[in-house]
Image (tube, grey):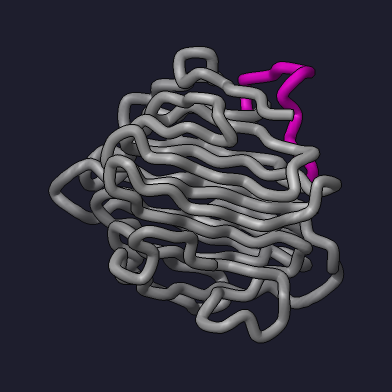
C-alpha cells in the first residue's frame, strides 16, 4: 500500500517564529486517521525563524531524530551536551528516563528541518544525545543510513528502536532502491524535487506512507533529496 499525503493536507501551525507542518497528529492538530505510522509517531516539517527556537522543555521514552535541511540548529540539554547541527546533518536524542533540552536557531537566516519521533523498543535507560556530519556526497545516487537501531551499523547514529533513518540525493532520472520487509512501515518525504515511489508520484514535501512492499524504488523526476524512515 502506498498512500500519498499531500503537503497542503498536513496539519499547520504558524507561531510567527515557528511555521510547522505536521504529518501526524501533534499538539493542537488531531486527526484520528493520522496518529502515526507503525512505530513512527511524529514527523514535523519545521521552519524556524532566525534568532529564535524552542526553549527548554522535557521529554521521556522517545527517540527524536532531527534532520536539518537548511541553516543550522543549536542544541543544549540537561546532561550538559551542546552542539550545532548544520544542513544535511543529523542529531539524535534518546529521551530515555527523562531529559530537558532546548533547540535554537542562532543563525541569521531561517532554519528548516524535519523533526521525527519514533517509539522506542527499549525503555528505562538513561537519556543520551548524539550528532554527526553526513556529507551529501555519501548519499548521491543511493540511500545512506543516518540512524539505526541495528548495533554497529557502520557510521550510523544509534537509536533505541527497530528502525532506520535513511536519505538519498538523486539527480533527475536517477533512482534509489531500498530492500525491506512487507510487514514493516516506511514513511518518506522529498523536501525538494518530484519523485515517483513504486510508480506513484509525489510532489515536494508530500508524505508517502508505505507498507506491504519488500522493495521500494524511488525515482527522481527532477533533482531531489529524499528522507525515509523504515520502522517496525
User: Is residue 74 left or right of 128 when viewed as pictured?
Assistant: left
Main secondary structure of the magenta stretch: loop
Residue sitting at 48 percent across and 66 percent down? 144
User: Is residue 87 left or right of 197 when viewed as pictured?
Assistant: left
Viewer can see residue 77: yes
Residue 155 percent location from the top left of the image: 51, 81
- Of the 4 image quadrants, the one containing the N terminus is top right
Residue 33 forms part of the magenta stretch: yes
Viewer can see residue 74: no
Name, please, the residue furthest toward the top. Answer: 9
Q: Quarter of the image holding residue 193?
A: top left
Residue 107 percent location from the top left of the image: 19, 53
Q: Nearer the viewer, residue 201 or 41?
A: 201
Residue 111 percent location from the top left of the image: 28, 45
- State whether residue 49 is above or below residue 157: above
Q: Quarter of the image holding residue 74?
A: bottom left
- State whether residue 70 is above or below residue 24: below
Q: Nearer the viewer, residue 181 or 21?
A: 181
Q: In the image, which residues are magenta?
A: 27-38
- State whether residue 166 is above or below residue 172: below
Q: Quarter of the image holding residue 151?
A: bottom right
- State whether residue 153 is above or below residue 10: below
Name, please, the residue furthest toward the left. Answer: 108
**Count of numbered circles on the image:** 0
Residue 172 forms part of the magenta stretch: no
Residue 93 percent location from the top left of the image: 59, 65
Residue sitting at 65 percent across and 33 percent down? 209
Amino acid at each position: 500500500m502506498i498512500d500519498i499525503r499531500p503537503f497542503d493536507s498536513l496539519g499547520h501551525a504558524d507561531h510567527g517564529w515557528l511555521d510547522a507542518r505536521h504529518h501526524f497528529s501533534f499538539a493542537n492538530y488531531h486527526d484520528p486517521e493520522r496518529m502515526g505510522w507503525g512505530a513512527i509517531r511524529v514527523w514535523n516539517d519545521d521552519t524556524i525563524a532566525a534568532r529564535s527556537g524552542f526553549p527548554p522543555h522535557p521529554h521521556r521514552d522517545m527517540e527524536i531524530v532531527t534532520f536539518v535541511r537548511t541553516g543550522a540548529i543549536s542544541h543544549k540539554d540537561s546532561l550538559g551536551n551542546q552542539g550545532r547541527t548544520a544542513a544535511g546533518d543529523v542529531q539524535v536524542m534518546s529521551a530515555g528516563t527523562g531529559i530537558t533540552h532546548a533547540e535554537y536557531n542562532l543563525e541569521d537566516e531561517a532554519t528548516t528541518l524535519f523533526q521525527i519521533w519514533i517509539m522506542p523498543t527499549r525503555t528505562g535507560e538513561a537519556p543520551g544525545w548524539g550528532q554527526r556530519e553526513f556529507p551529501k556526497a555519501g548519499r548521491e545516487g543511493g540511500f545512506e543510513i543516518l540512524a539505526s537501531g541495528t548495533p554497529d551499523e557502520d557510521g550510523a547514529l544509534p537509536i533505541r528502536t527497530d528502525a532506520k533513518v535513511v536519505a538519498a540525493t538523486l539527480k533527475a532520472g536517477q533512482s534509489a532502491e531500498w530492500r525491506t520487509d512487507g510487514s514493516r512501515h516506511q514513511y518518506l518525504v522529498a523536501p525538494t524535487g518530484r519523485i515517483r515511489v513504486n510508480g506513484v508520484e509525489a510532489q515536494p514535501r508530500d508524505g508517502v506512507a508505505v507498507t506491504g512492499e519488500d522493495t521500494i524504488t524511488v525515482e527522481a523526476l527532477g533533482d531531489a533529496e529524499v528522507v525515509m524512515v523504515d520502522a517496525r
